[in-house]
Image (cartoon, helix red, strand yellow):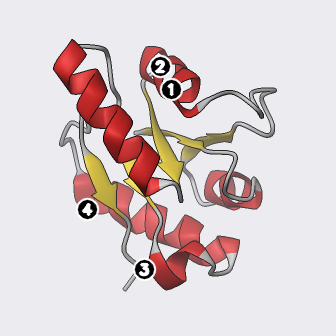
Amino acid sequence: MQYLIDEDLTPDIAHIGHQLGLDILSVHDIGRKGWTDEEQLTRAATEHRCIVTGNGRDFERLSRLFYAEGRAHAGVVIVQGALRFADPAAIARALVAFDRQRGRFSMEYVCHYLQPAG
C-alpha cells in the first residue's frame, strides 16, 4: 500500500516510515501543504495513496461524501488518542504493523483507526 501523510502530522513519520520500508510521502515534502482536505483526498485517490491523518472527523465526513458521489477513494488511516501525540517513530511503526496485517485487503472507502504496534 502507498501512504500519504497529511499536513496535520509531522513529515518525520514519512521519513521514518520510508526507512522502515513503507511507500510513504508527506504533503510537506511534495509541495501540497495548504491544500484542502478534499483536494488532498482527491489527488491521493488518483495516486492510489491512502491518507494518514489526525483529522478523523473531516476525513470521515469526506469519505462518506466520496462514497455517496461515487468518487475515487484510496482509504484513510486515522491517528487518534495518545498515538496522535506519540513520537513519530511510534506512528511509523504502527503503520508498518498495520500494513503487514492488512495484507491485500482493499482500503477503498475505508476509514481505519490506527492502533499502536504490539
Figure quadrant of the C terminus: bottom left
Q: Which mark is residue 38?
A: 1
| Residue highlighted by disc 4 | 101
The residues bearing labels 4 and 3 have C-alpha atoms spaced at a distance of: 13 Å
Labels 3, 1: front one: 1
Q: Residue at x 33, y 45 (%)?
A: 60
Q: Amino acid at mark 3?
A: Pro
The residues bearing labels 1 and 4 have C-alpha atoms spaced at a distance of: 28 Å
Q: Earlier in the sequence, mark 2 or mark 4?
A: 2
The reply to whether residue 33 is visible in this rendering is yes
Labels 2, 1: front one: 1
The residues bearing labels 2 and 4 have C-alpha atoms spaced at a distance of: 26 Å
Residue 23, image quadrant = top right
Q: Residue at x 29, y 56 (%)?
A: 112
Q: Residue at x 56, y 73 (%)?
A: 84
Q: Residues within 10 Å of mark 1 (few under 14, many from 20)?
A: some
Q: Amino acid at mark 4?
A: Gln
CB atoms of marks 2 and 1 within 8 Å? yes
Figure quadrant of the N terminus: top left
SS assignment at label 2: helix
Q: Amino acid at mark 1?
A: Glu
Q: Earlier in the sequence, mark 4 or mark 3?
A: 4
